[in-house]
Image (cartoon, rainbow, N blue to C red):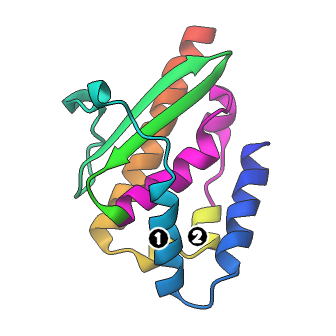
């Protein structure tokens, strides 16, 4: 599945909910299904800077695609990173680098987060794209 198709799927899923309480509950559920990072990767270097809560992300290259795992100590943040991992994990670095993240605005996520969480969301996207840039450089 392409990044665009996954994003459209997420937009469709979020449109099924009438209010933001239901959407938050859905995000919390998504966080529970997150492919968890191994304990050995829960280290300082894997913490995303700019997040109020702790978010660890680990990336590794498998068959020219990046596989991400993550965890967070906050349930909403865990849901946010779960959405991003769903979109970007298993994708080619160049596709991640070029990906548009307008779907976040389409589902209204940024506007329904506190300013610190919204900044954290931006930091998470930046970090995932930085991994993509690093792996793309290795491929060239």
Which residue is under mark 1?
110
Residue 121 image position (x, y, % from top left): 41, 57
Residue 114 image position (x, y, % from top left): 32, 75
Residue at 27%, 38% in the rendered image: 47
The quarter of the picture where residue 57 lies is top left
CA distance separating discs 2 and 1: 6 Å
Which residue is under mark 2?
105
- The tally of labels here is 2
Residue 140 image position (x, y, % from top left): 63, 8
The quarter of the picture where residue 137 lies is top right
- Give the main secondary structure, helix, strand or loop, of the magenta stretch: helix
The magenta segment is 76-102
Residue 79 among magenta residues: yes
Whether residues under marks 2 and 1 lie with C-beta atoms below 8 angstroms apart, the answer is: yes
Q: Earlier in the sequence, mark 2 or mark 1?
A: 2
**Frontmost residue, 43 versus 120:** 43
């Amino acid at each position: 599945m392409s990044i665009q198709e996954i994003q459209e799927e997420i937009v469709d899923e979020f449109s099924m909910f009438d209010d933001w309480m239901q959407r938050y509950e859905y995000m919390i559920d998504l966080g529970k299904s997150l492919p968890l990072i191994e304990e050995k990767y829960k280290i300082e270097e894997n913490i995303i800077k700019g997040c109020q809560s702790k978010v660890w992300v680990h990336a590794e290259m498998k068959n020219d695609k990046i596989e991400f795992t993550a965890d967070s100590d906050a349930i909403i943040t865990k849901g946010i990173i779960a959405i991003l991992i769903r979109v970007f994990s298993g994708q080619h670095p160049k596709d991640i680098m070029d990906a548009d993240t307008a779907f976040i605005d389409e589902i209204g996520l940024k506007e329904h987060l506190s300013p610190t969480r919204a900044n954290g969301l931006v930091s998470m996207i930046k970090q995932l794209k930085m991994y993509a840039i690093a792996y793309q450089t290795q491929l060239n």
